[in-house]
Image (spheres, grey):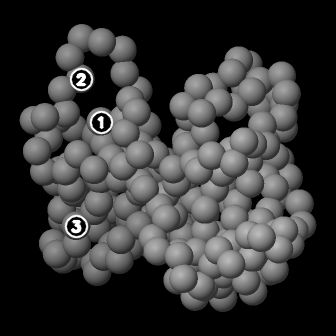
Amino acid sequence: GIDTGGCVKLPEQLEGQWRFRKRITFPAGGAPSDLNVFPVLVSISHSEFFEHTRADGRDVMFVDNHGKPLPYERELYDAATNRFLAWVLLPVIYANQETPIEVYYGSPDVGETETPSLVWGYGFSAVWHLSEPAVDELETTLHVDSTGKGHFGTQQGNKSVVGAIGQAQEFDGVDDHIVVANSHTIALGQTDCTISAWLKTATNYGSGIFIK
């Protein structure tokens, strides 16, 4: 698992901007070879973290082992249940040695620090987390494309539910679906590519997950 350790007080000279930090260590052996420029999901549930962050969870910054800021996207911040989820872009995850990063937090005056389009801008044509609130059988919710490339999805009857990572969407298996804007610009061509989805079905599902 990922060791998130305990809370560490920052040196006095840094207290004016970031009051606390936490080391996060990805253990060796998690992959057969080094993974380069790879988004990873970071989950923090220590109560101390939520005691020292703002109510909106925006006073957070990730840095690599050399103190360089890392792009991240906030997936969930829920102080009531002590759940913080973020996708963090790491320059490399080592196969045969630990990969340490740090999360800085507790800055009352800092502005927005997340940059989703930088997390998913390398090699991703579109990314939908489907975490937006959606009321059953409506067509009013826009599902954001985190790459920043404008492939928004429009709700077609689906509804929001609790998922494995934050919120998710439920489809009735009859006519619920999501229509993607500018889908003609998602050109897969003849090159190798990967299409992935996290889903749970109640029965064997014979239709397509992605249809273009």
Mark 1 or 3, closer to the camera: 1
Q: Distance between the residues labelled 2 and 1?
A: 9 Å
Measured in 3D between alpha carbons, the distance from the residue under mark 1 to the one under mark 3, in whole angstroms, is: 18 Å
Q: Residue 60 carries which label?
A: none
Evaluate whether residue 19 shows in this view.
no
Going from N to C along the chain, the mark reached first, 2 or 1, is 1
Q: Are marks 2 and 1 in contact (CB under 8 Å)?
A: yes
Does 126 appear above or below 186? Answer: below
Instruction: Compare residues 24 and 18 and report the one nearer the observer.
Output: 18
Mark 3 highlights which residue? 142
Figure check: 153 above or below 66: below
**Residue 94 showing in the rendered view:** yes
Give me the residue at 61% from left, 68% from top.
60
The disc, 1 or 3, on the residue closer to the chain's N-terminal end is 1
Give the residue displayed 28% in from the left and 80% down from the top.
Answer: 135
Say which element carries label 1. loop
User: Tag on residue 188?
Assistant: 2
Tags 1 and 3 touching, CB below 8 Å: no
Hey, which quadrant is residue 80 in on the image?
A: bottom right
Residue type of the residue flagged with mark 2: Leu
